[in-house]
Image (tube, grey):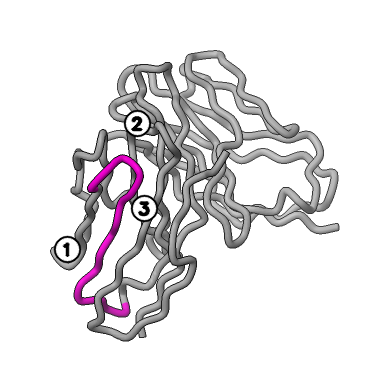
Amino acid sequence: DAGVIQSPRHEVTEMGQEVTLRCKPISGHDYLFWYRQTMMRGLELLIYFNNNVPIDDSGMPEDRFSAKMPNASFSTLKIQPSEPRDSAVYFCASSLMEGLGAGQPQHFGDGTRLSIL
Amino acid sequence: GDSVTQMEGPVTLSEEAFLTINCTYTATGYPSLFWYVQYPGEGLQLLLKATKADDKGSNKGFEATYRKETTSFHLEKGSVQVSDSAVYFCALTRNQGGKLIFGQGTELSVKP
């Protein structure tokens, strides 16, 4: 079975440019999560969706960040304009509804390594 | 609020040594508990889980027991291998929309 697919795997761009990260969750999963991982701050939840609807975006660092999920098989995370402090690894994860049983795990993609120069 | 605390790393062990990575949590109710592993350059993978008190999760020689009385979920392995070198994350969910609360991660390095 295909896992969570993220693209691109690596992105290097200059400060001020728009960056778009993409995610395809596992088919049939109801939840989609965006995380950011840095050495300084560890793993941070940015936003998550349930059935394509944003549920909690309290982790989005500022208005430069936005996320959308136009359908059940695709989500984007945009940064505009990008800044050097946005450099990090961004992960997407998906999971099934909790109602199917306690402790449904999240399945992670391999991440996008973003470098803003 | 809910939180997870792991022992600080890095942890360096020789091959075949015994491993313990401590994890304690703070949460109301009865959360589900997880250990995830992250190998270099990869995303996190579920290693094991436990959904109620006294449950023992196990996988690939690793195990952890859900201890409600001590709010702990320590990860153990009897004999580590070089291939176990990775970062290990403890996490919980209170089953509210699948949101996970992660610990800060513990880096394990196993030397031959």
x, y percentage for residue A37? 42, 59
Q: Determine whether A10 is above or below B28 in the image.
A: below
Q: Determine whether A50 is above or below A79 in the image.
A: above
Q: Name the residue type under label 3.
A: Tyr
Q: Which residue is mark 2?
A: B98
Q: Which residue is mark 1?
A: A62
The residue at the point 17 percent across, 68 percent down is A64
For the N terminus of chain B, the quadrant is top left
Q: Which residue is mark 3?
A: A35
The residue at the point 78 percent across, 43 percent down is B80
x, y percentage for residue B21? 61, 40
The residue at the point 55 percent across, 36 percent down is B35
Q: Name the residue type under label 1.
A: Glu
Instruction: Specify whether A101 is left or right of A58.
Output: right
Magenta residue span: A70-84
Provide the secondary structure element on which disc 3 rests: strand
Q: Which chain does the residue under circle 3 lie in?
A: A
Q: Which chain does the residue under circle 1 lie in?
A: A
